[in-house]
C-alpha cells in the first residue's frame, strides 16, 4: 500500500515538474531525482500509536480504521513533501530566469558601450576631415589670389614695356598716344639701384630687388607686414 501511494505521488510530482517547463539538463535531472527521493515516506511518520488502540473496537473495524489512519498520514506526509519540493522548483526556475535576464542585460550594456565608443570615433574622424576640408579650401582661395595678382603684374609689366617703347617713339616724333599708360618705376625701393623683381604679399607691391627682399619684413612701399613674397619672371 505504501509503495503504491508513493509511486502515485512521484508520478504527480513529475507531471507538475513537466508543467513548470524547465530546461532539461544534467543539473535539473539530478534536482528532480533529489525531489523524488524526498517524496519517499519516512518510517518516523508512522510510529505514533493511534488513539483508538485504547478503546474496545471489534478486530475488523479496528484494523480498517488503523489502515485508514495510516493512509491519511502517508497522504498528508506526501502532500507536505510535494508542496515543499514544488516550491523549491518554482524558486529555482525563477532564479534561473532572473540570472538569464541579468546576463542578457549585461550583454546589451556592453554592446551599447561599444556602439557609443564607435560613434565617438566616427565623430572625431568627421571633425578631422571637416577641418582638413576648411584648410584645403583656404589654401585654394590663397593660391587663386596669388595667381590673380601675378596676372595683373604681368599685364602691368607688359604695359610698362609698351610705355617705354612709346616714349622712344615720342622722342622720334611729336605724335602723342592717347592710350598711353602712366609710368611705373621699377627700381628697388630699398637700394634704389637694382630693378624691383619681387612682389610683396598680401599688399602686392613690386618694390624690392631679390637681394633686398631677403632682408625686409615689411613692404618698402606701403609698410604693411610681409607674409611672403614672389619673385617675378618677365617674358623675354
Ligand atoms: Zn634692392
Ligand atoms: Zn606694399
Image (cartoon, grey):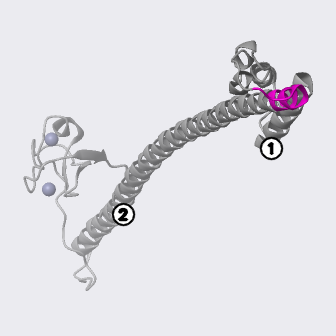
| Residue ID at (29%, 65%) | 156
The vertical placement of 194 against 27, above or below, is below
Figure quadrant, ligand 1 = top left
Mark 2 neighbour density, 10 Å: few (under 14) some (14–19) many (20 or more):
few
Locate residue 185, reporting x and y percent: 16, 59
Locate residue 103, reporting x and y percent: 59, 34
Judge left or right: residue 112 versus residue 176.
right
Query: Which labelled disc corresponds to residue 19?
Result: 1
Locate residue 35, reporting x and y percent: 75, 24
| Residue bearing mark 2 | 148
| Residue ID at (8%, 57%) | 222
110 and 161: which is toward the camera: 110
The kind of secondary structure the magenta stretch mainly shows is: helix
Query: Which labelled disc corresponds to residue 63?
Result: none
Magenta stretch containing residue 58, yes or no? yes
| Residue 186 visible in the snapshot | yes
Judge left or right: residue 128 versus residue 43.
left
Judge left or right: residue 136 versus residue 212.
right
Q: Is mark 1 within 8 Å of ligand 2?
A: no
In the structure shown, which secondary structural element does the residue marked by tag 1 occupy?
A: helix
- Magenta residues span 56-67
**What's the CA distance linking mark 2 and mark 1?**
88 Å
108 and 220: which is toward the camera: 108
Locate residue 119, reporting x and y percent: 50, 46
Mark 1 neighbour density, 10 Å: few (under 14) some (14–19) many (20 or more):
few
Amino acid at each position: 500500500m505504501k509503495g503504491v501511494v508513493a509511486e502515485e505521488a512521484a508520478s504527480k510530482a513529475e507531471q507538475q515538474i513537466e508543467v513548470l517547463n524547465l530546461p532539461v539538463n544534467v543539473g535539473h535531472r539530478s534536482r528532480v531525482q533529489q525531489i523524488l527521493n524526498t517524496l519517499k515516506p519516512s518510517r518516523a511518520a508512522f510510529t505514533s500509536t493511534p488513539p483508538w488502540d485504547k478503546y474496545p473496537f471489534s478486530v475488523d473495524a479496528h484494523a480498517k480504521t488503523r489502515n485508514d489512519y495510516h493512509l491519511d498520514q502517508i497522504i498528508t506526509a506526501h502532500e507536505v513533501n510535494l508542496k515543499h519540493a514544488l516550491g523549491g522548483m518554482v524558486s529555482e526556475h525563477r532564479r534561473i530566469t532572473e540570472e538569464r535576464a541579468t546576463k542578457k542585460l549585461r550583454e546589451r550594456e556592453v554592446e551599447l558601450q561599444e556602439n557609443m565608443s564607435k560613434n565617438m570615433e566616427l565623430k572625431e574622424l568627421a571633425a578631422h576631415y571637416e577641418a582638413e576640408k576648411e584648410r584645403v579650401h583656404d589654401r585654394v582661395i590663397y593660391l587663386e589670389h596669388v595667381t590673380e595678382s601675378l596676372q595683373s603684374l604681368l599685364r602691368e609689366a607688359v604695359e610698362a614695356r609698351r610705355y617705354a617703347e612709346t616714349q622712344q617713339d615720342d622722342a622720334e616724333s611729336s605724335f602723342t598716344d592717347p592710350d598711353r599708360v602712366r609710368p611705373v618705376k621699377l627700381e628697388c625701393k630699398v637700394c634704389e639701384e637694382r630693378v624691383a623683381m619681387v612682389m610683396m604679399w598680401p599688399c602686392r607691391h613690386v618694390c624690392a630687388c631679390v637681394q633686398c627682399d631677403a632682408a625686409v619684413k615689411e613692404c618698402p612701399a606701403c609698410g604693411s607686414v610681409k607674409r611672403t613674397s614672389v619673385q617675378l619672371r618677365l617674358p623675354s
